[in-house]
Amino acid sequence: MDNTRPTLEVVARRAGVSRQTVSNVLNSPHVVRAETLERVQAAIVELGYHLNGAARQLRTRRSQILGLRLQPVEDGINGAVLDRFLHALTERAQSRGYRIMLFTAADDRGEITSYRELLDSADLDAFVLTGTHHGDERTRWLTENAIPFVTFGRPWVTDDEPDEHSWVDVDGAAGTRAAVEHLVAQGHSRIGFIGWEAGSDVGDDRRAGWARAMQAAGLADDAGLERLSSAVNDGVRQGAQATERLLADESPTAVVCASDSLALGAVTVGRGQQSPLAVVGFDDTPVAAAIGLTSVAQPLSEAAARAFDLVMRQIGGGDGDAADSHILLAPHLVVRQSTHRPA
C-alpha cells in the first residue's frame, strides 16, 4: 500500500490543470470556472490531498489563517513599531477566530517563494504585507494570482500606475508637518531635518511634510531646505553624526527626525550644546517616553484593525458596508520635554 501523501502536482495532473489552478481552488475559488472547480475538487477528495485542511476548505472556503513575513529588524528601537502592529493584528484576528502565521524571507523574491509554499502546504486564506515600496513585486504577484492580501503601507505608485489593492497607511507627512508647527509655536525658526537616504518612500514622505511646513511658515526656500536637511542611514550613531554636521554648518535650534533612533542621536549631541537643541522624533517608541522625547505617534492598533477588516472583505468574512479600501490614518504629536523654547 502506498502511504505517500499526495502533492499539489499530483492533484493537478489528476485534474488535468496547472498547479496554480489547484492553489486557486483551495484559496480563491471565486476566480476558477465552475467546471474546473468541480473537477479539481473531485481530484482533491479522491486523492485525499491535505485531507483535513483541504476538506475543511471545500466546506468553508477558509482556513482562518493569515500569513505575515517578519521583516529584519536593523534597529531595536524602531523594531518596536512593527512589534506593536503585529500584536494588535494578532489580537484582532484572534477575536474573530483567525490566526497569524509568521514566516521569514531574505528579500521580496524570497517572500514570494514563501507565498507559494504556504499556499500549497498550509492553505492560507490571505497575506498581510509590510514594508511596501515602488515596484513591489509581492503585490504584483499576489494580484496576478488572485490571492487576497492587504498592505500596511501605501503602494507608492506614480500617477500613471494603478492603485488597486487594499492598503492602510499612516500619513507621515502630516506627522512631520505637525512637528514643525509645534516648534514654530515654541519660537523656533531654524528647524533642521534628519532623515533617510533618498529613495526611501516612507522617509521621503516624512521629509516632504517638514519641507512644506517650513515653506508655509516662510522659514526656508528650496536652497535653505537643502542646507537644513541631512540624509543618513537609520541609527543612533548616524543621527548623532548628522546632528553634529548640521550644528556646525547651519546652527539650527531644533531638528525634526524621521525616526526615534535618529532623534536619540540628536538628543545625545544636542544636550551637550551651550543652548540645548530641541528634538522631535517619529514613531513614539518606548525609548521616546523613557527619555522625554517629543515624538510623532502612529495609530498602530487602528491600522492593524483596519487592515484585518479590509482583508476580511476580500475573503468574505467582513462587513459589507466597510470603508474604502485605501485608508490613510492621521498620526498625532506627543509633546514631552525635548521640545523646549529656544534659549
Image: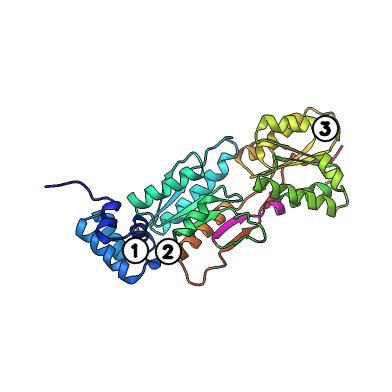
Residue at mark 2: 315
**Kind of residue indicated by mark 3:** Leu
Nearer to the camera, 204 or 267: 204
User: Regarding mark 3 in the picture, which secondary structure is present there?
Assistant: helix
Residue at 24% x, 50% y is 6
Q: Which residues are magenta?
A: 165-174
The numbered dot on residue 11 is none
Gap between marks 3 and 1, in whole Å? 60 Å
The answer to whether 209 appears left or right of 286 in the picture is right
Residue in the foreground of this view, choosing between 206 and 38: 38
Residue 247 disc label:
3
Task: From the top left corner, tell me how far across and down residue 48 is, in percent.
Answer: 21, 56
Mark number displayed over residue 61: 1
The type of residue carrying mark 2 is Ile
* Rendering coords of residue 236 (x, y %): 66, 32
| Mark 1 residue element | loop
Location of residue 142 with respect to 80 vertically, above or below: below
Q: Are marks 3 and 2 in contact (CB under 8 Å)?
A: no
Question: Residue shown at 78%/29% (left/top)?
Answer: 244
State the separation of the CA atoms marked 2 and 1. 9 Å
Is residue 142 in view from this perspective? yes
Name the image quarter holding the C terminus.
Answer: top right
Packing grade of label 2 (10 A; few <14, some 14-19, many >=20) is some
Say whether marks 3 and 1 touch (CB < 8 Å): no
The answer to whether the residues at label 2 and label 1 have Cβ atoms under 8 Å apart is: yes
State the image coordinates of residue 144 (x, y, percent, origin top left). Answer: 47, 59
Dot 2: element: helix
- The image position of residue 223, as x and y in percent, is 86, 44
Looking at the image, is mark 2 or mark 1 earlier in the sequence?
A: 1
